[in-house]
Image: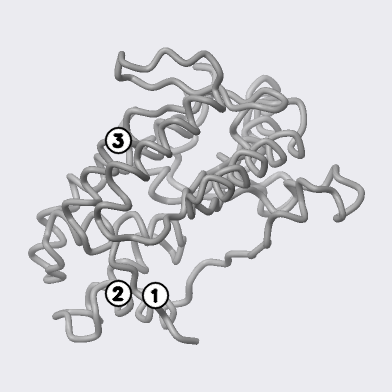
């Protein structure tokens, strides 16, 4: 398989400007047929969520992306299942309609979102418009060999300490694609591509702080405080595998909800674990 490196990942000025613009946006909820989006900056007064999203991306295309010389972008929506709506196909159809409209305007903007394997399970026919628009790719944890290939693709095969950094990254992420990409992106920015052990240890606290802000706090944004406290209590247990047998009936009642939210993973009958060791580390620091 041929791997391509995209110039956007290596263009500091364009990336910083685009990230600064996108950080002003926050998707709060999804209603049938439209996004509801907030933008922190006060100059936008559009009432429709779809109109705000459309205006923002058109503006970014005109002011940032095209002047930087890029022919297209991919808009990533992580954990689409966390957006509150009555059904998944309504969300997926809304996203499809929004991004198809960009092609009419000559904007080359694709969309990629992550969600559980059963996200479309309630849609009976794969001929539904909400499903036909998407190509599904199943992501498994990367093996150590695949992690090495990924690091080489990001930093180049001639970067120093490729093997050592790949081993460290595999141990930290357990091959989780999202965490691998997040950490590598941060290392490219903070350490300017240096993969030495000293540089990695120096920047890890800042990287983890960014991970806490952009990922873990987002994971808990819609979780009631009682469930968050239960997660913290579970993180403090010495064994990463949690047996429900010794828990109270009240605590056990939350397990199905936390599993549906993707924060707990059921590994066997009556046995669970937090969805990732880095999430467990975050909860332990919060306790």
Query: SS at mark 3?
Result: helix
The disc at residue 113 is none
| Residue at the image position 46 percent from the left and 61 percent from the top | 176
Query: SS at mark 1?
Result: helix
Query: SS at mark 2?
Result: helix
The CA distance from mark 3 to mark 1 is 31 Å
Looking at the picture, does residue 249 appear above or below residue 63? above
Query: Residue 112: percent from the left, percent from the top?
Result: 55, 53
Which residue position holds label 1? Answer: 147
The CA distance from mark 1 to mark 2 is 6 Å
Which residue position holds label 3? Answer: 21
Answer with the quarter of the image where residue 56 lies. Answer: top left
First along the sequence among labels 1 and 2: 1
Residues 16 and 167: in front is 16
Looking at the picture, does residue 111 appear above or below residue 70? above
| Residue at the image position 18 percent from the left and 86 percent from the top | 158
CB within 8 Å, label 1 to label 2: yes
First along the sequence among labels 3 and 1: 3
The CA distance from mark 2 to mark 3 is 32 Å
The disc at residue 166 is 2
């Amino acid at each position: 398989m041929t791997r391509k490196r995209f110039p956007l990942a290596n263009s500091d000025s364009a990336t910083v400007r685009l990230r600064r613009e996108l950080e002003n946006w926050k998707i709060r909820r999804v209603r049938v047929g439209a996004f509801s989006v907030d933008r922190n900056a006060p100059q936008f007064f559009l009432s429709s969520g779809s109109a705000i999203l459309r205006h923002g991306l058109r503006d970014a295309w005109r002011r940032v992306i095209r002047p930087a010389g890029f022919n297209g972008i991919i808009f990533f929506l992580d954990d689409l299942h966390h957006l509150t709506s009555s059904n998944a196909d309504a969300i997926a159809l809304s996203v499809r309609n929004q991004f198809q409209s960009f092609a009419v305007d000559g904007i080359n903007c694709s969309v990629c979102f992550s969600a559980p394997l059963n996200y479309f399970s309630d849609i009976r026919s794969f001929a539904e418009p909400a499903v036909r628009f998407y190509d599904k790719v199943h992501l498994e944890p990367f093996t150590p060999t695949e992690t090495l290939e990924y690091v080489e693709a990001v930093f180049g095969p001639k970067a120093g300490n490729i093997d050592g950094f790949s081993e460290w990254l595999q141990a930290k992420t357990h091959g989780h694609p999202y965490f691998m990409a997040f950490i590598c992106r941060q290392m490219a920015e903070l350490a300017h591509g240096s993969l030495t052990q000293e540089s990695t240890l120096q920047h890890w606290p800042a990287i983890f702080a960014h991970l806490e802000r952009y990922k873990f706090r987002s994971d808990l944004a819609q979780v009631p405080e009682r469930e968050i406290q239960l997660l913290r209590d579970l993180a403090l247990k010495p064994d990463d595998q949690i047996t429900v047998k010794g828990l109270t009936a009240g605590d056990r009642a939350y397990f199905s909800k936390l599993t549906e939210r993707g924060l707990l993973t059921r590994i066997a009958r009556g046995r669970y674990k937090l969805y990732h060791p880095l999430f467990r580390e975050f909860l332990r620091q919060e306790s």
